[in-house]
Image (tube, rainbow, N blue to C red):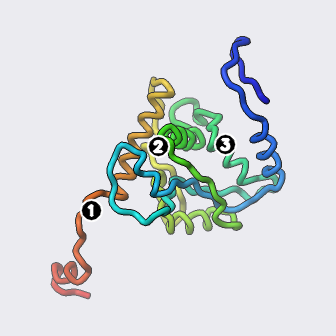
Amino acid sequence: MVIYQVHGTERQKIDASLLKAMKHEQIKCIKGVYGWYILSDDLKKLDAEYGALDKSKRIYLYIGTVTGTHMSSVTSRFLGELYGVQISADKGSKFDTDFAVSLVIAFLCEKEINVYFDVLSDTHGIEEEVRIAQREDPILQAVSAMRVKLRPDIKRAIVEKTLAEEIATVGTVVLGRLGARFPKNPVNSPRPEHVSQAVGGIH
């Protein structure tokens, strides 16, 4: 058992079994591309309505990878993004990526939504990360042909708010992105032949 205290006052007890299990995983130095996701079945727990989705469909939040250095580990990325230990990496102007992702996880867990972490590929590196992100289209990231980047409304400027307010702010962004991705009443896009007719029938 690990006991967290502030000036001798106990704030939190932490079961050491997680620590032991994660250290066992870290020493394996697992490499590859990983992803955080939720399941479509859990969207009903949010205070919003979404369009019909396949049962147990994975909705990816974030895709990441590790470097090729000897001691790098996907498990370490899991721990870093779960806890978000460093609030800011640039002298306090913007959230660190790990902290921003941890805020999203905290918000979803408060809504009693299970958040999953999975290793999606044994190949590490940016090229594989981009390939998988283009396929899965994670809602927290912008994906280009060259890189995968956390969106600025998630990794945003730090303002004078409490952590509870920050989580709520991030939650609003997440709900908005889910609503845009899975609208209850999607606008029907014209079929390709209708588009070609609109531009003079050019194929």
Q: Which residue is mark 1?
A: 186
* Residue type of the residue flagged with mark 2: Ile
Q: Quadrant of residue 31?
A: bottom right
- Between the C-alphas of marks 2 and 1, the distance is 25 Å
Q: Position of residue 191 (x, y in %)?
A: 24, 78
Q: Is residue 193 left or right of residue 119?
A: left
Instruction: Please indicate whether residue 182 sits to the left or right of residue 37 in the image.
Output: left
The residue singled out by tag 2 in the image is 154
Q: SS for tag 2?
A: loop
Going by the numbered disc 3, the residue's amino acid type is Gly
Q: Residue 65, can we see it?
A: yes
Q: Which mark is residue 76?
A: none
Question: x, y percentage for residue 64?
Answer: 61, 56
Q: Residue at x 78, y 40 (%)?
A: 17
Which callout, 2 or 1, points to the residue nearer the camera?
Answer: 1
Query: Which disc, if any, is residue 80?
Result: 3
Say few, some or many: other residues with alpha carbon within 10 Å of mark 2 (under 14 / 14 to 19 / 20 or more): many
